[in-house]
Amino acid sequence: MDDFDKKLYHDLNLEIEVPKEFTNIIKESLNNDKIKKKVSHYSLTKIISVACASLVLTAGIAYASTEIVKNIWKEPEKVVSNNNIITAEEKAECITKEKATAKANEIFKKFGYSNEKIKSTTLEKSSYKTIDWRFETESEISLSFNAYGKDGFWLFNANVLKKDIKNYRTTKEEAEKTARKICEKYGYDLSKYTNVSVKANLIEEKDAYIWYVDFSKEYNGLVNSYDYISVAFIPEVNEIYYFIVNTSEYDNNTVEIEKEKAINTALEAEKNIKTGYEVECLDAYLSIKKMNSDAYLRINDYEQYIEPKNKLTSKEEIEYVVEKHIRKVWNVILLIRNTNSLLEHGNTYSYYVDATTGEIIGGESDACDITVERDKGGKKYTFYRDYETGEILLKEAYITH
Amino acid sequence: MEELIEKAKNGDKDAFGNIMLSLEKDLYRIAKLRLKNNDDIYDAVQETILIAFKSIKNIKEPQYFKTWIIKILINETNNIYRKKCTKKIVSFEEINTVDIIDALDNIEKVEELADFNFICKKLKYEERVIIALYYIENFTDKEIGKVLKLKEKTVTTKRTRAKQKIKNIIEKGVKV
């Protein structure tokens, strides 16, 4: 059991308040006289009126020209990785501790933490060649940034959560304005970050006391969720909880592949993996995604994908490393029915089909929490929650067979 | 517990009720992994109790009682969840504003504690169940596999991935 296991055992077993009514229900459930099937208080009276939503995103499809499109996908490099050990080769590529410390001090100073004393400096590895420098001050302000010198950083001030902050309030509109002012104050130009998301720490925004504002870059209406500035702060006192600058190089590739073709590519790939599963396409839309090896492994070694045997030892494992590209893709969401598992009524897999080359350049399992049902007329509706955006969507399913 | 189970098998409602009361926090947590509305949770647990009491006679291995009851509860929460999803009616205008279906959206954000609310907010349903059964109920991967009808190795893999996900989120905040 590692330290993180211990943390999970501790945190997850913290007391949870069980409503008194719940106890009463248990006590009374077997008392026939008192069993009353509870009627939920939800309003179930609204009628589904699903308008045909034509995805505007598809409007800009450029049909394949005669120009030969170069492939972007390369087979992943199979490497043995140990996240506890940073190899000499990896370390050699990192910026030195001195340079990193200078950068950290510069950032601390910029955000008004120049009096902070650095308590610890560590190199942290999360996967093969993904290494961060991490600094923590005596008053628990932490800062991490890419150890290879890539722009961006993650600055957290956990102290603010220990203060008496629960009475500070603002509105959504004001929160955005405040976040903009904070960015401006620290010299961050938001003119290219056109997509704004404002969230509060409580559903009842009037009671919220932490506000999270994300500014992301956008390309023709597509949000690049890998290139953003995030600010979390306490209103009224405007104290920063965290400030994140995440940068990424986006290929900004053109759309040469039609939606139908992308869907077929994904369906073919999935249907060839395993027989006996029902596969259908639920949706496909243009999106900006990072290349990954998930779909590659799924397609080429399904057994390994489902039950990885890549743990060489308790610490070492095989990783499939791909080139770092952020591309415009058709995000093709497939519903895969496997009636064997209790929870798999809603299993999905999303294939990232490159919008320019038509290659599968990545994927993600269960990107949506999904429920599919047919109404009386046989029409199929699908609810799903996109885990990346947090959006809950209702769509008519795109049925291909 | 085993004595109470024996009594319950012989039709003793009080004994069965006492077993259920001893598990109330576990039952509430498991139901809340899927359902956000307390009324739905009450429905699910009520159904679970009725089903379980009817079929408790068939239990041959009392040590697996908890596994068995959790399995029934997960089934019931799934049934209610599915019914809700089909009955909940939304117009397209509402889609982006109304919070429907998922238990996740009525729960406070918890930023650094990997507590129960945190896993409800940040993990996919299957991951939530696996993590909760492992760390809260102290189930082994084999037992979780029995509940979810998954191979033990699959559970191990999914649990490891979920754990890494929690770790990433805690260490790096949002958008990892």
Image (cartoon, coloured by chain):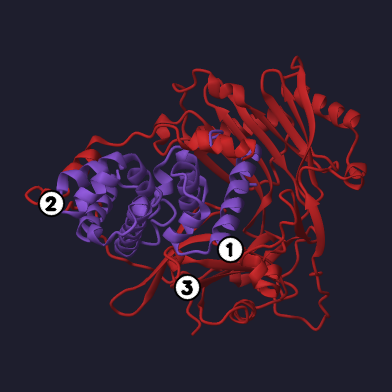
Give the chain letter for red. A
Residue found 45% across the figure and 40% down from its top = B117
- Above or below residue A400? Residue A348 is above
- What x and y, as percent, mark residue A398? 48, 76
What number is the disc on residue A140?
none
Dividing the picture into quadrants, the one containing residue A123 is top right
From the image, tell me which residue sits under label 2. A36
Chain on which label 3 sits = A
Q: Nearer the viewer, residue B45 or A109?
A: B45
- Above or below residue B90? Residue A35 is above
- Mark 2 or mark 3, which is nearer the start of the sequence? 2
Residue found at the far left of this picture? A33
Q: Amino acid at mark 2?
A: Lys
Q: Characterize the local packing of mark 2: few (<14), some (14-19) or many (20 or more) Cα atoms within 10 angstroms.
A: few
Q: Nearer the viewer, residue B51 or A237?
A: B51
Residue found 50% across the figure and 34% down from its top = A11
From the image, tell me which residue sits under label 3. A338
What's the CA distance linking mark 2 and mark 1? 40 Å
Image hue for chain B: purple
**Where, quadrant-wise, is the N terminus of chain A in this rendering?**
top right
Chain on which label 2 sits = A
Residue found 43% across the figure and 44% down from its top = B137
Q: Nearer the viewer, residue A244 or A338?
A: A338
Chain on which label 1 sits = A
User: Quick check: can you spot residue B37?
Assistant: yes
From the image, tell me which residue sits under label 1. A365
What's the CA distance linking mark 3 and mark 1? 14 Å
Q: Are marks 3 and 1 on the same chain?
A: yes
